[in-house]
Every structure is written in structure tokens, then in C-alpha cells.
Amino acid sequence: MDNKTLADQLVKRCLKKGADAAEVYLESNRQLSIEIRNGQIETVQEAASAGAGVRVLIGGRLAFASVNDLRDAALDDAIGRAVGFARITTADPDNVLPDDPTTVDVAGLYDPAIAATPLDQKIAMIMTAEKEAMKDPRITKSAGAAYGEGESEVVIANSTGLLKTSKASGCNFGVSVVAEKGEQKSSGGEYCGRRFFADLKTPAEVAAKAARKAYETLDPKPVKTQKAAVIFDTDVADTLLAGILGAIDGESVLQGASFLGGKLDLKIASELLTVIDDGLRPKGPASAPFDGEGVTTQTRVIIDKGVLKGFLYNTIIGKKAGVKSTGNASRGGFTGLPGIGSHNFTMSAGTVKPEDIIKATKKGLLLKEVTGYGINPVNGQFSGGASGFWIENGKIAFPVRGLTIAGSADEMFNGIDMVADDADLNRGLAAPTFRIKLMQIGGE
Amino acid sequence: MNYQILDGDIPRRKFLELGFKGSLAVAATPALIAQLLSCAPKGGGKSPIAADPGLLDKVILKALAQGGEFGEVYLENRISRTILLEEGKFKSAVFGLSQGAGVRVISGDKTGYAYTDEISEEKLLRAAEVAGTIAKGAGKTTEAAAVKAKTLPSFVTVNIPLADVADEKRLDVMQRAHQAALDYDKRIKMASINYYDEVRGRTIANSEGLLLTDELPLLFFIVQTLGTGNGTSHMGRERLSAHAGFEMFDGGAAEQAAKNCARESIVMLEAKDAPAGKLDVVMQNGWGGVLVHEAVGHPLEADNIAKKIGVFTGKLGQKVAAPVFTMVDDGSLPNFRGTTNFDDEGTPMKRNVLIQEGVLLKYMSDVLSAKQLGMERTGNGRRESFQYLPIPRMTNTFIEKGKDKPADILASTKSGIYVQSLSGGSVNPVDGVFNFTCREAYLIEDGKKTVPVKGATLIGNCLEVIQNIDAVGDDLEFGPGICGKGQSAEVSAGQPTVRIRGINVGGTRAGR
């Protein structure tokens, strides 16, 4: 029996066991990972697994069970547990399952060439990456190189008649090295992930960036505590996007736990800020034809030239808010209930070059790494650890490390005054290099 | 490269992912495999064959057939419940069932690993074959010793087994916490209670003849409250966690956690901008142990030491910290969140003094790094589930108590920040730069805790920070958390009240 038939049958079994409505989420996947270091294989891991998540509604009461075994008795057990567990939850008329017969094709989500490529070729690729990264004399140690791939097949069926399936794959590799100088140690790593094997960058390109990240931050100098411009490199652009994402979660908005809650159709940011959530982009790392509960995905403008245009909803939270699901039910796998999440969440590119932004900055921080929790989705406060380069008179002056940066989301969003044209769209959260006019920087 | 620790302060969805990732099992009664059967009464469950020493020997033999010097089989099952009470409703109830096995082969510095979620002779042998290919051509085979069951002392005592607890009891504890939070102050607009429990069974067998089986319960109870007022909002968080039975909730522990959480939500509504720049910091006892977990704990895990890239590489026996600083990792503290009877490679848990009075004594190892470094196995080989290789991880990590009185530490600090609780932190184990983020903090003015300040990130270098700790209190306390290092692990972090001189604070106004 194929998984589609199985899912359909399981929905019926749930109804027979007492559920008013039911959803079955089946996932099967295969993974491979290889790690090497100093030209030697360190680990090879290989596995295939599968599981089912069963969501049931009984009189508006919701429960869920998952099991990583698709044999009959195990599935029966899971259904029984879910139905039994629904006894304890609270009835809620907003607890409904999506009814969405629409479908859409998203190109470029599955590449059979990944599995077909011989293991030796994958090993050779990361061996080359490590060798290339170690070429520079400033690089003293390898922290290892790794290759990973996975593919998965998802089937969603529910009692409204929804029955959808999709198949996706991905592969990635990366290398991490250490530069040493006296007592100083500095690590640098870079990776590349793609839907298709043939789209991966060359090992030399990835290696060169990893090495550069390690050595170019040696000999950092201190700077004084001050206010200055902060230029966000594409590597840290997700700081801003993750902050927006946390605050446009439809459930947080309903609960009054979002700093963007009351701001729909209001100007919340500089006109240079446009943010799109796109589930449909061909080969997109977060593209999918349907979301975690089977609702067809879409392309939506979230922030249009600084104006907040929408929040993200799944079916239940959408019903509570009186709107339709936006196709943003997220699912971390078969083991949990759908939450709310984005697809390819990107900040639109500007027109200037990243170099132009540096040139236009009299004094400031070129931010390459941010640590900490990011923007607090409840109140918009931001504070983080920072490292990168100090800019003086339009030029990179020296590396900096161990700084802090802080501000409020409001100041940050409105402070964006330059946006470059260089976003890397192969990341789930992607933004071009941009500058925030003024932020508090903590140093000496 | 960044390793992090969290108090659960991640979107709920993410938390569920972390909590559930591929690893929940079938069964609630003793003895691993017998349970599997008892919970799948229709006969479709797993075969009891897996626990049979004869089969385990066969799998290990197969794993080492192509070479290699260490073969291991790890069997796991897990059953879990997650219940969410939020906005006055029991919104969801989630059951997780999982089981599976991983087979590992070590050959020199190489490791092969394969797992299967079906525990059958055929699948185990297949996993053994896949894992064993790593050793191909190594030309070295090892004679595996026949496995022999043994029993180790237990550090987890259970009075009220989770399997005996009616769901109504769980709901009742949640309900009481929810009410206590809302009753605390009318500015508490929402309370969210997340209840998680699991029972995890393990069987570990290896080519050294080891065969161990146990089953441990785990509880994780997270309260979140939203305070709104004064033109802002603050989401508070408080947690309870232990490897224990339902007695963890005795004495009104859930209500107390809820009140503490609500108190934080209200206090922080008055928070002022935090200062920026280098300041003295006093950290209250408890979960502040995140500092030592991040700043020193991760860098002392032996995997990066064996790779010679860790910041403490080559520093064994050297003075690395202030003389007041003693740091311990102890997986045998009774019933703690980071406690187990033996690690996920079968090494018994014990107290490991890592830094004594400033001198580095020990790294935390797993089987592989211990072999590579020629050091003892410390009981730190842990894995999130059968889907993961074991790697060196912390258990319950803390700064040992000192002699100072907490009140004196505060009083003798002229100005700075008093950190009452933290969210979490992260560290780069190579360069040693770490950070942690305040959840509740206050200004220190003239030796007194004054106004609350907004959540700031603090950042420093590990080698500097442990030399700049100049006061250690006598009030050691712990907090529970989730540690992330490519896979998640349940840990505790602890410390007495400590003072650190000169650490960079990420505030929004010019310092001092």
C-alpha cells in the first residue's frame, strides 16, 4: 500500500474510533551525512525513517499522537492514544481542519541526482574544500568539513477530503577552519545548501570564504562605547527578519504578545524595507506546494515600503482571527502539531552596491556576526553580542570582537537608510546588506 | 560554530520540535522490550529479541566484521505527553511514541553510524553492516567480548511513577499554576502552562562486553506569563524539571513557579534602558550557571580538545581561573534534570571536578575523545536519541560554592548590573567568546539593587571572565535548561552568587 492510500485509510480509522474530524501526516525520509577532518573520514551516518502524526477533533477538543512506526498495530495504538487524549482538552469551535482542494506546482523541489551521485564524489568534494581552506598560511587547523543530504516525502490527508503529497530534497556542504596567531584563535566557517546537487557552489569558493572569515578577524582592536551606524552583512541579515517573523505570528498577535500587533496598515519602517513571504519560488529552500496542514502556499507582501500589510496564520489561528489561513502552518516533522512559520522570507534588494554603503559610512560597524536572542517579539527590544569590522571614513579600518549592539525594533526598522542589491536567496531568511543609521554600541 | 543553552525561551513550535525530535517511544512499564510488547497488545509491536544478549553479540560481531576496534548497539524507546493550557483552555494534548536503535563502529579516529526505527534482527544487522563499512580496509579487527548484563547504582528515585498518574492529576497541577499566575496581578493578561513528561528506556551493549538497561522518567514544566502595562509588555518564564516521578510537584511547586513567573512579568514592566559598555556584574545564584555552562563548560568538552582547536587545548594542569573558582560537572546529583545513571555510552555518572581553585584538572569526554586524548571516560557521552551519535555533553554543571555572603557581594559592588535571571546564552568554543541574555536584571547603585533594566545581552571571553570572577557566594543553586550542540540535551546549570569585574553589557544608553 502506498502512503497516500495508507493516510486516507488512517483518517477513516480515526473517524471509526470516535473522532469527528481527523488528519494524518505521514513522512518518510532518508539522510546521509559525512564528516572529514585532516583529510580523513571522521564519521559517516546513514539512515532512513518514517512516522505518522495523527490529529483528531472530538466535539471541538483537539489531541494528537505520533509514532515512528508505520505498521498496523503501532498506527492503531497512536490513533487510540490520540482519541483517548482528546478527552482531556477544552472544546473550542475554532478547532477545525482545513478544507482546501486547490493545488499548485512548485518547480525544483526534488533532485534525483543527489541520491544517484556516488558517495566517493561527495567525499572528494569536502576533501577538496578542506584542502583549499587550509591553503592560506594563516590557517593553522581544520575544524572539519561536512556533507549532508536528505530527502523526504510528505502525505497529508484529512476528513474534509484533503489528500496531498509532495517530495523534496536538499544537500549541503561546508568547511570550518581555525586561524591562530600567538595566543589568538579565530574560527571561520562557510557552507552552501541547495535543492539540487548541480547547483552547489564549488568547494574552492566555499573554502575561500571560510578561510577569510577565520583570518580576517585576527588582531581585533577595541572601540569605545558609542552610537554609530551599523551595516548588517548578508550573513547576519536574518537578525532583523527573525525579529519581524516572531512579531507577525498570528497567534502572538491575537494574544497581545507582539510589538507589531496593533500596527496593521501602519508605517512601521523606513520606505526602504519591503519584506515578502514566498512559498512558491522555484528551487527555494523553504518553498513547498502546501503548508504543514495541506493549505496551498502563496506569495505575500508582509511589509510594503515600510507599511505592515499582514500577519501569518494557520487554519485554527486564522479562524480565531476571522481570516483564512495564509498557508503558514509550519511543521517540524510528524511528531508535532502544526505551528506558524514562514516560507522563503526575504527582504527585497535595494539598488546600491554593498561597497557603496561602506564608502558612504564615516564611522560605524560592519556587522558580521550577532549572538544572543535577537529582537524580542513581545516588546521589540534588541540586544546582542557583535563582531565584524570597524569602519572609518568609508573604509574598513580593523576587525572588532566582543562588542554589544542594542536598540529597539522601532529604531532599527525606521533607521534603515541604505539597502544593497546582494541578497543570497538560497537561505530561508534572506536579506541584502543594509545599514541602520545609528545604534548603541557597547565596547571599552 | 556556536553552542547554546536555552531556558525554553524559544517559540513554542521550536520548543516542541526540540522536545520531540524523532525520539518518542512506546512503553511505560519497566524493562525495555517487555514494555514494547505490553503497549502493543495486538502483537504488532517490537520483538523481544532485541534485548537478547545473544542477538546483541551477533549485531556487534556484524558491526566489527569489516574491521574496527569498538562496536556498540544502542536501543531506545520513549513515550511522552505534552499538554498545553493557555488562555484558560487546554488547547492541545500530544502523545509521542518512538523506538529505534543505533549501531556505531569506531575504527581509529573514524566513526560509522547507522540507525533504524524498527528493532528487528534483520534491521539491526543491516544497520551494523552500514555502520561497519567505515572500518573497511582498516586491516584491524577486534575480538568482541560477549555482552554480560550488569546493574549500576541509580541516581534517580521515583516515588510516584508517571505511568501511575491519571491525566486528571496532570491537568490539576496545570490548572493550579495557571490560576496562581492570573491571581498574582491584574496586569497578567495571559498565562501559558506547558507540561511535558516522558519515560525513556535505554539498552546499551558494546564490544567491551557491556550490557546496561534502564528506564528514566523526565518532567519539564514551563510557565509563561504576559504582563502588560506602562506602555510595554513582558513575557516571563519559569521552569521546573527533574528526572523524577510526579512528586516533583509536591509542596505547591507549580504554583510557586507560576507566582515567580508573574512577578518577573510585572517587575519588568518598569524596566529602564540598560547601560552599554564594560560594567561589573553580580549574578544571583541559580540559572546564572549559564555563564559557566557557556563560558567554560562547552570549551572543556573533549571533542574540540582532541581536535586541538578548543580554547583550553594544552592547558591541563595550568592555572586558568581565579583561585576562588572551582567548577564541577556532576551527572549523579539525585534526580536532577541533567542526571542519569550512566551516559548514553554506558559510562557511570560521577562528580567530575574540572577546575579546582583555578587549576584545570579535567576535560569532559566520551568514548572516542577519551581514547584520542588517552584520558578517562568521564560519563559525558550523550545523545538526543537513537538518531544521533553520542558526543561529549554536560550534565549538571556548576560553580562550586565559595565563602562569601551574597549580601556582602552586592554591598561591596559600587555600581554595575545585578543579574537575577537569564534566558540563555551561547559560545564559540574555539575563540571562547560567549554571551548570555538577561531575563531579569537591575542596576547596582552604591552597593544596592535599584531599578530593573531591559533585557541586555552580556558578552565576554571565557579565559578573561574566569580570571575576573572575584567573589563567590555560599548559596549554590541550580536551574534546568536545554543545551544545543547540533542535538539537544537536558541539562542543569548552577552557581552561587558571583561577581565578575568588567564585562561588556549590551544596553541602549551610554554606560555608567
Image (cartoon, coloured by chain):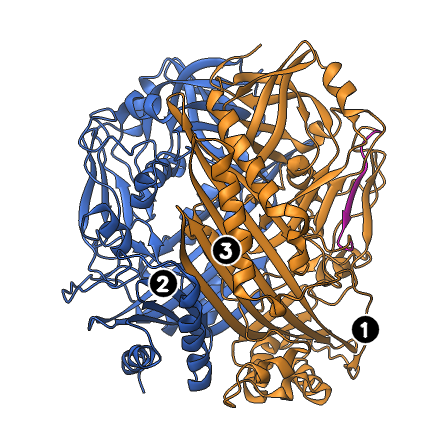
Chain colours: A blue, B orange
B326 part of magenta stretch: yes
To which quarter of the image does residue A60 belong? Answer: bottom left
* Protein chain holding label 2: A
Kind of residue sitting beneath label 2: Leu
Choose between B347 and A86: the one closer to the eye: A86
- Answer left or right for A112 relative to B498: left
Question: Regarding mark 1 in the picture, which secondary structure is present there?
Answer: loop
Question: Regarding mark 3 in the picture, which secondary structure is present there?
Answer: helix
* Disc 1 to disc 3, C-alpha distance: 31 Å
Question: Taking the image as drawn, is residue A375 in sight?
Answer: yes
Bounds of the magenta segment: B323-332
- Answer left or right for B234 relative to B385: left
Q: Are marks 2 and 3 on the same chain?
A: no
Nearer to us of marks 1 and 2 is 2
State the mark number for residue A62: 2
Choose between A104 and B235: the one closer to the eye: B235
Q: Are marks 1 and 3 in contact (CB under 8 Å)?
A: no
Name the residue that disc number 3 marks: B18
Mark 1, other Cα within 10 Å: few <14 / some 14–19 / many ≥20 = few
Residue B249: image location, x then y, percent:
64, 52
Q: Compared to B256, does A315 lie above or below?
A: below
Instruction: Give the number of marks.
Output: 3
Q: Are marks 1 and 2 in contact (CB under 8 Å)?
A: no
To which quarter of the image does residue A235 belong? Answer: top left
